[in-house]
Image: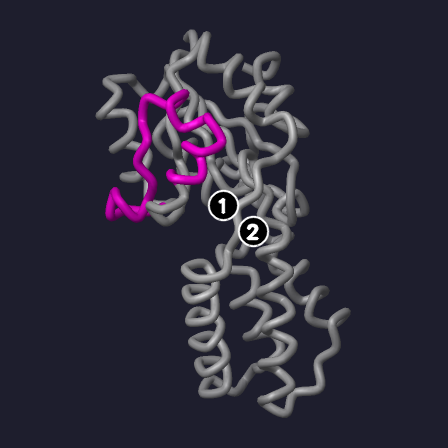
Amino acid sequence: MKIKAVLLDVGGPILDEDHEYGAWDSYLLRLLAEEGMKVGRERLLRAIAEATERCAPHPRVSALWALARPDVGRFRRLKDALREFQRRHIAEEYVPRLRPGVKGALEGLAERYTLALAGNQPEWIKGYLAEEGILDLFAWRFVSEEMGVSKPDPLFFRMILDSLSIPPEEAAMVGDRLDSDVLPAKLIGRKTVRVLLGPYADQVPISPLHTPDRTIRDLTELPSAL
């Protein structure tokens, strides 16, 4: 079946968010110290890496449990503090960064396929994408905050495909995460392409449904993968 639409994750394939994860990790080190927990950077990063590798949906939350167990109360305090920091940081301090070569890659793809944003992102991120001259390349321009549904809920993907009037078998999902991009896309019968960028490049498929149809290093390789 010929691919007609390409759904693209935003954070990871399009935007470089490594600095954002670094900010979260630095905050966690301070938070753990305030809790009186002697956890060095190496130990924290190892716990996050182990959770990432096994496709934990929220690696840093999983790492907090690994470090705080069996103290449920302490874990809840740490998790809630992290969530609040993430919410505040994204709203007030996050600075988006377009990955090199992305604009040219998207322009080429838009000539051959119907493109759709498929990201768990705040609505304001579209202003940045417009400033970079890439928002108009997408036929579907809604992100999770506007949709009221987020990945990995399969409804997120159904909403996009239904609105574009494209059956799942004629669409491909492109993302950097096996758990929230590849798995739910496969559940509704779509082809999947994994982009090996950022911290989620360390994920290891834990089932056939977590295994992408193709794997690429960046979006410049996507046309040949499709």
Q: Which residue is mark 1?
A: 179
Q: Residue furthest bottom?
A: 36
Q: Is residue 200 above or below residue 196?
A: below
Mark 1 in CB contact with mark 2 (< 8 angstroms): yes
Say which residue appears at 58% left-offset and 48% top-offset. 17
Q: What sort of colour scheme is used for the picture?
A: one colour
Residue 9: percent from left, percent from top: 47, 36
Residue 2: percent from left, percent from top: 43, 7
Say which residue appears at 42% left-offset and 27% top-offset. 7
Say what secondary structure mark 2 lies in: loop
Is residue 198 toward the left or the right of residue 91 in the image? right
Q: Nearer the viewer, residue 94 or 195?
A: 94
> Which residues are the magenta region?
126-150
The quadrant of the rendering that contains the N terminus is top left
Q: Which residue is mark 2?
A: 55
Residue type, label 2: Cys
